[in-house]
Image (spheres, coloured by chain):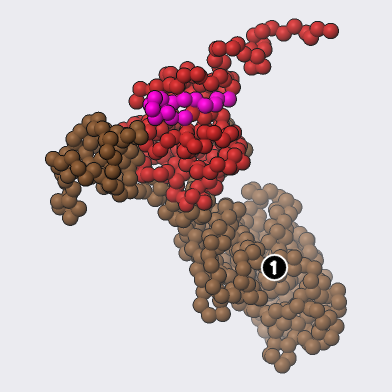
Chain colours: A brown, B red
């Protein structure tokens, strides 16, 4: 087995900055600590160029650079981002662990057949992390612990043979070997500088002074003991929240975080090989929230399409109060079967297939706007058809055979005032519905108006006045 | 210097020259309308493909849907999707089914007048529909032009059913056909690539 370790040195910072457009250029810092003693938790490159450093007092930072924008560090957001990255890594491997802070470990050898050799695979990982907006370092080693140590030494380290790894590890300084607690620092002060020197010491005395953990760590590093990891299992729902950091009262500034959230959702969906049929974009205010529900007729996971639909619905939603955070929740993640397309399909290049077109129409016109008509067995015209809103009707059975019926039916019968009415055929007596309280006793005629329109009109049985028009033979 | 002589057949085939008084056949055949007299009068032998067809009506319910039924039934039988964008009344399912239209691929889009044109254009442009019927109530030739372009790029039959008062306005539609209530006949007002028949056509319904 070969393990890759992805180290995300600026995870907390990236978690915030990747949700903000053009955030790279402006100096930015995360702060934490008590209110009287604010310290910088991490700084971006632009801020570092002005001499700001992590751990610096906030007042000192302001003295160096008055215009630095800051935000409180949120450990929960950082850990949510960590979980999301584990879900993303799950696309590439079935063994993923996030047991170390700011790092993701995944088994990669089994995935080489699918994703190509390591150089190519590594390139893929880097490109995807880059596009998601995470700074990263990557290393490859035969055991997870060794990969974790190597990634701390140099970006892009790849060691596949155990012998080569052992020689390399012998030269690793103890302070950078990720030894448990402060063992590394204590060993260094005792004059033990490298792992090779530590291994040369008698094991019993090392164990007495530093505990069994150090030796166990060493054995795992050198591949002499099993190196178990806590494997990640993806949850069955998607729930992600973005703190905006400022108050938003219009739609355009919400689109960037929305796009990020939807991209994350799609990454998550592709890891599960699932789709999403219903999700909620929750706009959080200082008190209360506004929900924007997006419902589809069939599962989907194309990010551009989901974004367009969510955007359409969001833009039609009124924002009653300033929005401070945005949250995307999807609880139902049904299996997704991508639509198969024929290789020799002759449809135009920019073609949209029907499910996509339907969702686009529904997003703008309303959920009930696209429907089909299905005949029903009832003889009363207003009950002889039903609306069907849904993905698929299946095969529609034939309606019972009846005399000629008009192509257009009026939503309600309307009085027909026409003096020059000509009866073309009829009557067809219709007497039904006494059982459901919607009793109908009518004589239907096909009539022609003076304007030349052919209508379908009825009168009470046996009479020739009080014409009610019910349809047009168009 | 005389131009190189070209055979008359080549010129006729390229449709740069056509014999007067005789209809020409388009290279791209249309969708047969199901009415022999109308098919014979139209250049493609039917409803023009990838184009906007305008039906100019004095009122709803003068037989415009019966005119389209044979083509719609043929399109749906072949699996093509037909969309009605904001129809003026409810399409009565038993009657459409009796006319041979497969209701599984007949979709109706409800839209307010402001959104109907947008929906019409989206359906045309998408390429997912084989025929789209709309009731645009606009006199704006630019909007009709958009519909014509959308029908072309989406490879789709577009039918715009409009009031006959628009007959006087110019239109980019490939085919314009007007209902004359007095004669109870259809008069072709314009057909691209062919001669307009002089006589109105009475179609047996």
Q: Secondary structure at mark 1?
A: loop
Q: Is residue A11 magenta?
A: no
Q: Position of residue A385 (x, y in %)?
A: 30, 45
Magenta stretch: give its range: B178-192
Q: Nearer the viewer, residue A398 or A111?
A: A398
- Image coords of residue B28 (percent x, y): 57, 23
User: Residue A179: image x %, image y %?
Assistant: 72, 78
Residue at the (41%, 33%) spot, across then down:
B64
Where the C terminus of chain A falls, by quadrant?
Answer: top left
Task: State whether residue A436 is above or below residue A210.
Answer: above
Q: Is residue A430 above or below residue A279?
A: above
State the image coordinates of residue A213 (x, y, percent, origin top left): 66, 79
Residue at the image point whose x is 43% and y is 18% from the top:
B37
Say above or below: B1 vs A241.
Answer: above
Question: Is the stretch drawn in magenta largely helix, strand or loop?
Answer: strand
In front of the other: A183 or B38:
B38
Residue density around tag 1, few if under 14, some if 14–19, many if 20 or more, within 10 Å: some
How many marks on residues? 1
| Front-lying residue, B197 or A167 | B197
Would you say residue B188 sits in the magenta stretch? yes
Q: Quadrant of the N terminus of chain A?
A: bottom right
Q: Is residue A56 visible?
A: yes
Is B19 positioned to the left or the right of A392 in the image?
A: right
Quadrant in the picture for residue B192: top right
Left or right of A258? Residue B63 is: left
Disc 1 target residue:
A20
Q: Residue at x 54, y 33 (%)?
A: B168
- Judging from the image, mark 1 belongs to the subunit labelled A
Residue ranking furthest to the front: A419
Does A178 appear above or below A468?
below
Seen at 64% across and 78% down, the residue is A75
Residue A378 appearing in the image: no
């Amino acid at each position: 087995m070969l393990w890759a370790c992805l180290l995300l040195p600026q995870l907390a910072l990236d978690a915030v900055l990747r949700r903000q457009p053009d955030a790279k250029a402006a100096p930015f810092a995360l702060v934490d600590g008590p209110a009287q003693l604010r310290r910088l938790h991490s700084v971006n490159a632009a801020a570092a160029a002005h001499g700001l450093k992590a751990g610096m007092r906030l007042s000192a930072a302001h003295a160096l650079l008055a215009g630095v924008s800051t935000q409180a560090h949120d450990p929960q957001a950082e850990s949510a981002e960590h979980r999301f990255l584990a879900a993303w890594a799950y696309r590439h491997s079935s063994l993923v662990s996030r047991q170390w802070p700011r790092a993701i470990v995944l088994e990669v050898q089994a995935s080489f057949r699918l994703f190509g050799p390591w150089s190519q695979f590594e390139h893929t990982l880097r490109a995807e992390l880059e596009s998601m907006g995470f700074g990263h370092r990557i290393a490859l080693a035969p055991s997870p612990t060794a990969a974790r140590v190597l990634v701390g030494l140099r970006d892009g380290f790849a060691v596949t043979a155990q012998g080569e790894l052992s020689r390399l590890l012998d030269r690793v300084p103890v302070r950078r070997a990720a030894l448990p607690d402060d063992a590394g620092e204590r060993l260094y002060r005792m004059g033990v500088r490298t792992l090779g020197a530590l291994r040369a010491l008698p094991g019993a005395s090392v164990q007495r002074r530093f505990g069994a953990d150090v030796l166990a760590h060493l054995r795992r590093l050198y591949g002499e003991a099993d190196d178990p990891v806590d494997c990640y299992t993806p949850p069955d729902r998607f729930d992600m929240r973005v703190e905006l950091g400022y108050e938003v009262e219009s739609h355009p500034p919400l689109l960037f975080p929305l796009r990020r959230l939807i991209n994350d959702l799609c990454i998550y969906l592709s890891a599960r090989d699932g789709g999403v049929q219903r999700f909620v974009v929750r706009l959080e205010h200082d008190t209360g929230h506004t929900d924007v529900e997006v419902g589809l007729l069939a599962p989907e996971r194309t990010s551009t399409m989901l974004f367009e639909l969510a955007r359409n619905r969001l833009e039609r939603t009124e924002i009653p109060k300033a929005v401070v955070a945005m949250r995307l929740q999807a609880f139902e993640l049904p299996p997704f079967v991508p639509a198969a397309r024929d290789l020799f399909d002759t449809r135009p290049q920019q073609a949209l297939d029907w499910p996509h077109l339907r969702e686009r129409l529904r997003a703008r016109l309303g959920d009930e706007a696209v429907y089909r008509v299905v005949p029903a067995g009832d003889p009363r015209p207003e009950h002889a058809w039903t609306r069907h809103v849904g993905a698929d009707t299946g095969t529609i059975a034939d309606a019972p055979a009846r005399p000629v019926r008009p192509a257009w039916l009026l939503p309600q019968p309307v009085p027909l005032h026409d003096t020059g009415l000509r009866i073309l055929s009829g009557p067809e007596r219709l007497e039904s519905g006494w059982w459901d309280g919607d009793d109908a006793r009518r004589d239907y005629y096909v009539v022609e108006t003076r304007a030349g329109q052919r209508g379908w009109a009825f009168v009470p049985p046996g009479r020739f006045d009080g014409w009610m028009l019910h349809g047009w033979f168009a | 210097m005389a131009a190189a002589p070209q055979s008359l057949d080549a010129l006729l085939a390229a449709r740069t020259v056509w014999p007067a008084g005789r209809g020409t056949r388009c290279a791209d055949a249309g969708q047969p309308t199901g009415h022999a007299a109308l098919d014979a009068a139209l250049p493609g032998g039917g409803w023009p493909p990838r184009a906007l067809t305008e039906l100019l009506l004095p009122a709803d319910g003068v037989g415009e849907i019966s005119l389209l039924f044979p083509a719609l039934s043929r399109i749906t039988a072949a699996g093509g999707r037909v969309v009605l964008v904001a129809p003026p009344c409810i399409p009565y399912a038993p009657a459409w089914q009796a006319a041979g239209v497969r209701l599984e691929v007949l979709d109706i889009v409800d839209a307010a007048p402001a959104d109907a044109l947008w929906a019409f254009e989206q359906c045309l442009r998408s390429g997912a529909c084989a025929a789209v019927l709309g009731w645009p109530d606009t006199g704006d030739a630019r909007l009709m032009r958009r519909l014509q372009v959308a029908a072309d790029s989406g490879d789709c039959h577009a039918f715009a059913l409009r009031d006959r008062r628009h007959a006087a306005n110019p239109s980019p539609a490939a085919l314009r056909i007007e209902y004359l209530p007095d004669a109870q006949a259809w008069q072709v007002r314009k057909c691209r690539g062919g001669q307009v028949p002089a006589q109105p056509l009475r179609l047996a319904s």
